[in-house]
Image (tube, rainbow, N blue to C red):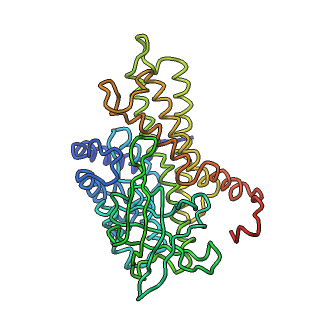
């Protein structure tokens, strides 16, 4: 079996390497966990778009590069940026979740108004989905919107809302048809976070930082044309976004970047004069993780192939979020163990490594096993939709699913 690339792709790889060599000094340093891209990150993002190294297949009229889908070229870009230790394009709720939703279901006006500034990093979005009484059972949401003088008037609360404190805009699920079945009475609205009546309160997590927020809506007025899809069809739109969210959380390129960082760490750290990577117990764990990351990478290519062909993706797509979030946590866990007693450090110690990012990632990634759809919910989805196992019986009082 010949797994080598043909001359066209080898030439493209040389092109990517040349770009990185010529421009890596412009790449942002230490953007890290910032919810809003730094000015340097925005400049880098726009440079990558112009050369087709991010937003590659998004049409030019909406601010993308406009290339035809090519799995191998996408793979080469990811590999070269990862191995060079240079950040690729931005990935956030607006770029990774809302943009593909608008491309699929938005109006032409919505596409032209929002996709380009979102891709460029000029507009930051948050997602208004979960509520105190509607997490895993999202369709039970209570935040409501009534029509008054040609506007939606929104009242209610959202929780676990990432980036809400920094966001310019929100895509939000609200109940507009109070007498409809719970899955059929929801609408998907987009509006400014500066709209009067919105209050944001940060929520500190086990990372020690306020990673999430709760939002309160009091008579928030939104023009009726700021809806994606039709009234009462928000559940359909929301599920499209959730599919893209699972893809974002299960990004195999991000996993490969973390694995390469782990390998560098294990080469540098020592125990009794021996590099951690040379110790059999640690090396065996690393080898296992390398195999799983490789499997995720090639599964990602399978999913991308299905998307290009317009196929649903099947089991390959369903396992992505569950497997990737657990694997990301395992990578950070090995890093913590490789650090030994230094793995206990967190903030402010002169002996901490990578500014405490391994400790932060360990705690944050543990939360992601719950966030974006818990591991238990993901297993239910896999069993019901992927393996065609019977659904759990539902009581009549629970309403239509």
Total numbered badges shown on the rendered structure: 0
Q: Position of residue 339 (x, y in %)?
A: 43, 24
Percent position of residue 125, x then y: 38, 62
Side of 323 where 203 appears, left or right: left
Quadrant where the C terminus sits is: bottom right
Give the quadrant of residue 169. bottom left
**What is the x, y in percent for residue 94?**
40, 62
Question: Residue 27 placed where, x, y %?
Answer: 26, 46
> Is residue 224 depicted above or below 248 in this figure?
below
Residue 234 sits above or below residue 210 on the image: below
- For the residue pair 354 and 260, the one nearer the viewer reads as 354
Q: Which quarter of the figure has residue 43?
A: bottom left
Q: Residue at x 44, y 70 (%)?
A: 103
Please identify the residue farthest to the front as the structure is shown.
218
Q: Quadrant of residue 381?
A: bottom right
Residue depicted at x 56% and y 67%: 141
Residue closest to the eye, 336 or 387: 336
Q: Relative to 297, is 196 above or below?
A: below
In terms of depth relative to the viewer, which is nearer, 317 or 225? Answer: 225
Residue lying at the far top in this picture: please name it. 272
């Amino acid at each position: 079996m010949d797994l080598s690339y043909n001359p066209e792709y080898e030439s493209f790889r040389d092109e990517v390497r040349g770009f990185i060599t010529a421009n890596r000094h412009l790449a942002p340093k230490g953007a890290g966990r910032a919810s809003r891209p730094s000015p340097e990150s925005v400049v880098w993002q726009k440079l990558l778009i112009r050369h087709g190294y991010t937003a590659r297949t998004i049409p030019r009229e909406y601010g993308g590069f406009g290339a035809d889908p090519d799995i191998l070229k996408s793979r080469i870009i990811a590999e070269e940026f990862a191995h060079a230790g240079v950040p690729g394009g931005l990935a956030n709720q607006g770029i990774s979740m809302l943009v593909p939703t608008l491309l699929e279901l938005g109006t032409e006006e919505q596409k032209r108004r929002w996709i380009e500034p979102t891709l460029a990093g000029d507009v930051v979005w948050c997602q208004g989905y979960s509520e105190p009484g509607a997490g895993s059972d999202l369709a039970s949401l209570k935040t409501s919107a009534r029509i008054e003088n040609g506007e939606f008037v929104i009242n209610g609360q959202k929780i676990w809302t990432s980036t809400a404190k920094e966001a310019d805009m929100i895509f939000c699920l609200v109940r507009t048809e109070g007498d409809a079945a719970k899955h059929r009475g929801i609408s998907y609205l987009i509006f400014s976070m500066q709209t009067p009546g919105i209050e944001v309160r940060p929520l500190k997590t086990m990372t020690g930082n306020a990673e999430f927020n709760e939002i309160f809506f009091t008579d928030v007025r939104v023009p009726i044309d700021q809806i994606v899809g039709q009234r009462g069809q928000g559940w359909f739109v929301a599920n499209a976004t959730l599919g893209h969210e699972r893809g974002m959380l299960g990004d195999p390129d991000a996993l490969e970047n973390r694995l390469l960082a782990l390998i560098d760490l294990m080469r540098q750290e020592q125990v009794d004069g021996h590099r951690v990577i040379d110790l059999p117990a640690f090396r065996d764990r690393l080898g296992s993780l390398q195999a799983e990351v490789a499997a995720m990478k090639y599964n990602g290519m399978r999913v991308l192939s299905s998307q290009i062909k317009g196929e649903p993706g099947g089991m390959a797509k369903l396992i992505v979020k569950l497997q990737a979030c657990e694997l990301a946590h395992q990578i950070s866990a090995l890093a913590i163990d490789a650090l030994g007693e230094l793995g206990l450090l967190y903030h402010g110690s002169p002996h901490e490594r990578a500014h405490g990012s391994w400790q932060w990632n360990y705690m944050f990634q543990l939360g992601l096993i719950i966030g974006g759809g818990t591991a238990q919910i993901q297993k239910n989805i896999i069993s019901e939709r992927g393996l065609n196992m019977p659904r759990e019986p539902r009581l009549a009082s629970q309403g239509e699913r």
